[in-house]
Image: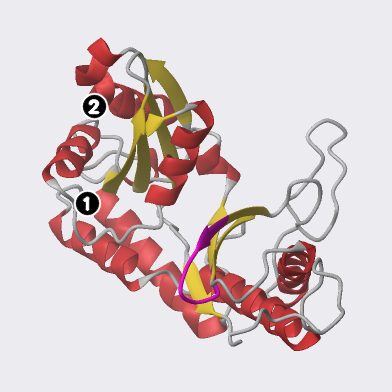
Amino acid sequence: MQPIVRTGMNTNRIDQALYRNIVKATCNAIRQAQIFLPADVKFAISNAMERETSPVAKSELRNILDNLSRAEELKLPICQDTGVPVIYLTIPPDVPYCTGLLDAIREGVRMATKVVPLRPNAVDPVSRENTGDNTGTGMPSIHVSPGSQLTITVLPKGAGAENMSRIAMLLPSEKASIPKFVAETMLIAGGRPCPPVILGVGIGGTFDQVASLAKEALLLPVNTMDPFEQDLCDTVNKLGIGPMGLGGDTTAIAVKVKRASCHTASLPVAVNVQCWASRRATVVVPL
């Protein structure tokens, strides 16, 4: 199959039909993520409510589920903090990775900001000037990997949870300290990231890579945890922080881990905190 560019066209551009499809798919993925919580996350919250022994915590979890129902009914965002868009692309070999493709993603973010609508959250880090459309230097955050289809996955990240994320460059001899670092991260966070949370944990790689691993872990389904993930989750829940920091059995509904090989002298660990509104959605772009 030939690359989807016009004959004689600059390779930084893509076919206009594909451009429009990417814009629309980006907007649709953002809208879906903002309004409809993934079924596995919703089910996990419902299960937590059934198991919860604290009346206050049970009531808070019920409020969350009621909020989700209202968002679906009214077709409005789940939370007033619609976050900043973190976007993951998979690109097949017949689609060029080029400026035009990234421009289409940004145009889709601008469109979603108007029509969903989204709160304009993207600002310059120093001047604090707001672009008004959730784009700007380095925004949205776009991550690309090869795939068999052109897909757009959106992971909105609100500040309350993102601000509590941490990274540590441990020594290999400190491997047993990983659960302590994860639990300590949540203990410091307390009720600020709107628990119950989902924690994405990255282990290995390099300083920058481990943070990416932790965030990518939030894209994994939460309906299953391996024994290591379950142990981490149980350790966090023993803190008793509970829903909205008001106490209870459910501080985290899941902990998900992604790993990468690292240097023999290094053990990077990162925890990316996500609130109960663990929003994500994937749309396949027609070619």
| Residue 92 vertical placement versus 199 (above, below) | below
Q: Residue placed at 30% from the left, 61% from the top? A: 221
Q: Work out whether 158 lies above or below 32.
A: above
- Start-end of magenta stretch: 144-152
| Residue 128 is one of the magenta-drawn residues | no
> Which amino acid type corresponds to the residue marked 1 in the rendered image?
Pro
Name the quadrant of the N terminus: bottom right
The C terminus, quarter of image: bottom right
Amino acid at circle 2: Pro
Q: Is residue 10 above or below residue 220?
A: below
What residue lies at 55% left-to-right and 61% top-to-bottom? 79
* Disc 2 from disc 1: Cα separation: 29 Å
The residue that mark 1 highlights is 55
Residue underneath mark 2: 179
Residue 117: where, in percent of width, then height?
70, 71
The answer to whether residue 265 is left or right of residue 250 is: right
Quadrant in the picture for residue 173: top left
Residue 117 in the figure: left or right of residue 182:
right
